[in-house]
Image (cartoon, rainbow, N blue to C red):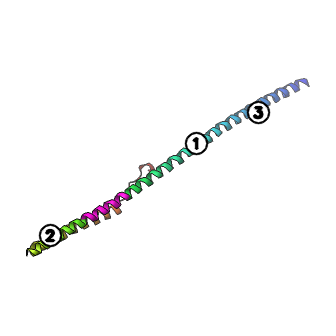
């Protein structure tokens, strides 16, 4: 009987050692998983911070662009007004000196110029609106 008890005791001791090793392995895996989760949370926090900074920068840039476009339109209207005023003064001078033919030629040239400018602007805007976005090579 004692010979039978020895293997059982030895087997029980081996089982206890295996269980302890298994529990140690599980403990190490949990520690490693906890570290992975901590690192992932830190990465997510950093991503959130960088995304918020990027959005703030984009908002600032767009605000500055709107301001510049508004100023450009204001300057364009002022410039157009000055040109129109100069043309009116020139037209008055030409009419006062009985040179209506010259005035009609200048107005005709001005109208032709405007047609080309408007046509070019419409063509540019049409091409820009119908432009296809670049294809992403990463998805292929």
Q: Residue beneath label 1, please?
A: 42
Mark 3 or mark 1, earlier in chain: 3
SS of the residue under disc 1: helix
Res. 107 mark: none
Main SS of the magenta part reads: helix
Between 33 and 136, the one nearer to me in the picture: 33
Residue at coordinates 67% horizontally, 36% vertically from top-left?
Answer: 31
Furthest residue toward left: 98
Q: Nearer the viewer, mark 2 or mark 1?
A: 2
SS of the residue under disc 3: helix
SS of the residue under disc 2: helix
Which contiguous range is marked in magenta? 67-79
Q: Eyeballing the image, is 138 above or below 25? A: below
Residue at coordinates 77% horizontally, 29% vertically from top-left?
Answer: 17
Q: Residue beneath label 3, please?
A: 19
Is 8 on the left or on the right of 33, as rendered?
A: right
Is 90 on the left or on the right of 69, as rendered?
A: left
């Amino acid at each position: 009987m004692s010979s039978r008890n020895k293997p059982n005791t030895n087997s029980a001791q081996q089982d206890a050692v295996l269980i302890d090793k298994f529990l140690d392995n599980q403990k190490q895996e949990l520690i490693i998983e906890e570290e992975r989760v901590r690192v992932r949370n830190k990465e997510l926090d950093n991503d959130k911070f960088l995304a918020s900074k990027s959005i703030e920068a984009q908002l600032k840039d767009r605000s500055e662009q709107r301001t510049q476009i508004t100023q450009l339109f204001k300057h364009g209207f002022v410039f157009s007004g000055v040109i129109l005023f100069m043309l009116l003064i020139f037209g008055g001078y030409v009419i006062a000196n009985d040179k209506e033919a010259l005035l009609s030629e200048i107005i005709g040239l001005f109208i032709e110029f405007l047609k080309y400018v408007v046509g070019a602007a419409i063509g540019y805007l049409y091409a820009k609106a119908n432009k296809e976005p670049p294809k992403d090579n990463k998805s292929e």
